[in-house]
Each structure stands twice: as C-alpha cells, then as structure tokens.
Amino acid sequence: MADPIIIAVPKGRILEEAVPLLQRVGIDPEDAFADEESRALRFRTSRDDIDLIRVRAFDVATFVAHGAASLGIVGSDVLEEFAYSEIYAPVDLRIGHCRLSVAEPAALAARDDPRGWSHIRIATKYPNTTRRHFEARGVGAECIKLNGAMELAPVLGLAPRIVDLVSSGRTLKENGLVEVETIAEVTSRLIVNRAAFKTRAEVVPLVDAFRRAVEPVAA
Ligand code: PRP
C-alpha cells in the first residue's frame, strides 16, 4: 500500500472542533488523538490510508507547505501571516471562529484615539499582518515578535499595545486589556499541498468530502 495521507491538525481549541468534523468526513481518529495528555504526535484513524499529526498551528502550514503533510487544518490568521505559495486553501471549515485584534490597557484606551496614531509599537505573533494592516492607513508599526503571552507586554513595558487572537475575550479581561480595533475575522481552513493535490489521487475526493461535511444540511 502507498504511504498514508497525512493530515496536520493544530493542538488546542481547534482540535476539539476538528474531531467531529473529521468524523463527518468519515475519518475517525484513535482515542489518543483528542487526549491532550497523550505525548504521541502521530495517530492512526479508521481509514488505513489516512494518519493524523498534532502540531502547533503555525507548524501545520509549514508541514503542508513542504509536503510533509498533504493536508492540514489551520486558521486564516496563519495563512494571512505567511502567504505560502505551495499551499492551496480550498475550503472554509467554519470552525475556530475568533478575531485578530489590537488591544491595549484599559487606562490607555480611555484617553487614546487610534485615528491620531502615526507610529506605534506592538507586541505580536503576527508582525507581517500587523505591519500590512497599519501601512494601509499610513501608520508605521514597529513589531516585537513574541510566540505567546502577548498580554504581558504592556504591563511590563515591552510594548504598549498588542495584536493577538481574541475568542471569548477572557484572556484580555484577566490581564486588564481592552480591544480597540479588529484587524480580521478568523476561521479555520482546509489546506492542501499543491503538488499532492495534483499527484495523489486520494486527495481530490478528500477535499470534496470536507466540502460536503461543512455544507449546511439540507432541510
Ligand atoms: C489564544 C490567544 C489568546 C487567547 C484568546 O491563545 O493567543 O491568548 O487564545 O482567547 P480568549 O479570548 O477566549 O481568552 P491560545 O490559548 O490558543 O494559546 P497560545 O497562547 O498557545 O496561542
């Protein structure tokens, strides 16, 4: 048998929503896949020809871009940040809803006017998207790249503002920050390695199966 098709799925919140979606596609992961305690990284499924890997969100795109995984599930935030030419993103999976926002301490927001910004310092995991967003309206954004815990940056003086994902808003609230601007609405996409799409016959029907699994159920 040919090597199994690998589908890369991000750890964390998207994974919970991805499991029922995968099941609707006809791919039932082994139990350890949804168990965050498990240290395994590669998992079998009910289909002998499909394995899953569980990696960080930004790494999903890297595995798929290099063809190490043929398909992946990843937020539109990651695709926006990296613009990989080797990746095709044919299906909005309508899971992982959140937004990419600018936030700052509540005390600063009370006297701040975003229309008056000309140069700002921002701590973020998304420097490319952030710079592009502000350049479009003539604001220079000096970005300090962090990989997590952006919310600490304002209070510790690293940067007065952050750009990060917001879902329930709880992380911002617990760290005394408020949203001042939304940069983008985010949902998860099915991504496919372009070469695999052309060369592996199993990939096209799989993409169609994902598309059908997210279509609204007919009344
Ligand atoms: C994301 C994001 C925020 C948080 C927002 O982090 O970076 O910290 O979720 O969610 P909320 O609005 O519901 O509080 P995540 O937990 O995905 O982990 P990460 O820090 O590894 O990105």
Image (cartoon, helix red, strand yellow):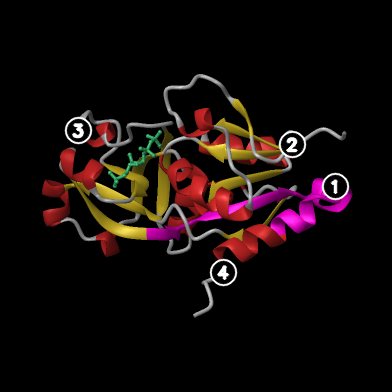
Q: Earlier in the sequence, mark 1 or mark 3?
A: 3
The mark lying in front, picked from 1 and 3, is 1
Q: Residue at x 59, y 61 (%)?
A: 213
Residue bounds of the magenta highlight:
183-207
Instruction: Judge whether residue 186 is colored magenta.
Output: yes
Q: Residues within 10 Å of mark 2 (few under 14, many from 20)?
A: few
Taking the image in four quarters, ligand 1 sits in the one at: top left
How far is mark 4 from mark 2, CA to CA?
26 Å
Closer to the camera in the image, 97 or 207: 207
How far is mark 1 from mark 2, CA to CA?
16 Å
The three-letter code of the residue at mark 4 reads: Glu
What kind of element bears circle 1? loop
Instruction: Judge whether residue 196 is colored magenta.
Output: yes
List the residue tagged with mark 1.
200
State which quarter of the image contains the N terminus: top right
List the residue tagged with mark 2.
48
Closer to the camera in the image, 213 or 203: 213
Mark 3 lies within 8 Å of ligand 1 (Cβ measured)? no
Q: Are marks 4 and 3 in contact (CB under 8 Å)?
A: no
List the residue tagged with mark 3.
155
Q: Are marks 1 and 3 in contact (CB under 8 Å)?
A: no
Q: Is residue 46 left or right of residue 95?
A: right
List the residue tagged with mark 4.
215
Mark 4 lies within 8 Å of ligand 1 (Cβ measured)? no
